[in-house]
Amino acid sequence: MDNKRFFYIFLDIKGVLYTADWIKFIQASGLSDDIQYKAELDRLLAEHPDWKEFYDKGGYNRPKNVRKICPYNMMSLNRLIEDLQYDYNVNLVITSTKWKEYFDLKTLPALVKNGLQYKDIVIDKTPIINEDKTFEIRKYLTQVRNTEDYVILDSDERLLNEFDNEKVILVDKHHSGLTDELVDNYLDMMSEKQDELVNDSVMFDIDETEIIGAV
């Protein structure tokens, strides 16, 4: 029987899975015959060379809600999910108000068609409570009786004032979104904390043994 704990990834899609640069890129790609947009496209490809493969394959011609999400940011999300799945049952929880409103019709298909690694994960959403993201996340955590095993992916710096900074991966909503570097830094931090817990446990066992021997 699977006795892994549940881990919750709170995802604000805008800024994390697509950025201002990505939206400009999609628009310029579709209008590249226009000299003005061609110059913008060349600039964006120079700043984001990985996107050339997407452009060459004509990926920008996909349906609107699908192409809005950047597959490169999705790769980084998949990397985070895959690593966490070794130790946890992973739940992906959408926090974006607009994406929650069209959860079944647009959000889920857009995530899956952009390559979300959805096998063995649950995709859910926080409740909508006056569009107060902090309260919505805390309400959700209360409902699932979880206080520790979660991370928030977002571009809103105010969340750092509301949650432990180790629980927030803050992204650049203008240029990069979620990246492998951010994921690696977070996973390294988690690994270091786990090592500290193990070392503390070993030290406790040693101290306890010494006490017993002394008695």
Image (cartoon, grey):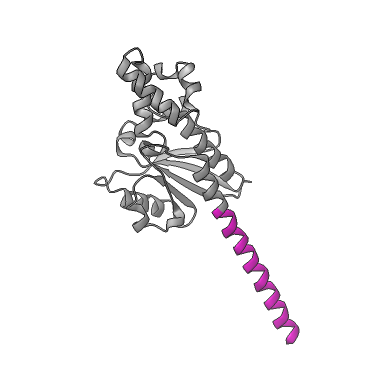
| Apparent side of residue 39 relative to residue 118 in the rendered image (left or right) | left
- Magenta span has 197? yes
Q: How many marks?
A: 0
Residue 40 image position (x, y, % from top left):
35, 24
- Magenta span has 3? no
| Apparent side of residue 72 relative to residue 87 in the rendered image (left or right) | left
Task: Relative to 175, say whether 138 is above or below.
Answer: below
Rendered residue at 35%/28% (across/down):
23
Q: Main secondary structure of the magenta part?
A: helix
- State the quadrant of the C terminus: bottom right
Residue 123 image position (x, y, % from top left):
45, 37
Q: Nearer the viewer, residue 143 or 52?
A: 52
Quarter residue 101 falls in: top left
Residue 124 image position (x, y, % from top left):
42, 39
Which residue reaches farthest bottom? Answer: 215
Rendered residue at 75%/83% (across/down):
213
Which residue reaches farthest left? Answer: 130
Quarter residue 189 falls in: bottom right
* Residue 105 visible, this angle: no
* Residue 95 visible, this angle: yes
Which residue reaches farthest right? Answer: 213
Q: Which residues are magenta?
A: 189-215
Rendered residue at 55%/54% (across/down):
190
Task: Relative to 103, say whether 60 is above or below.
Answer: above
Residue 70 image position (x, y, % from top left):
43, 29
Task: Relative to 199, say whether 179 is above or below.
Answer: above
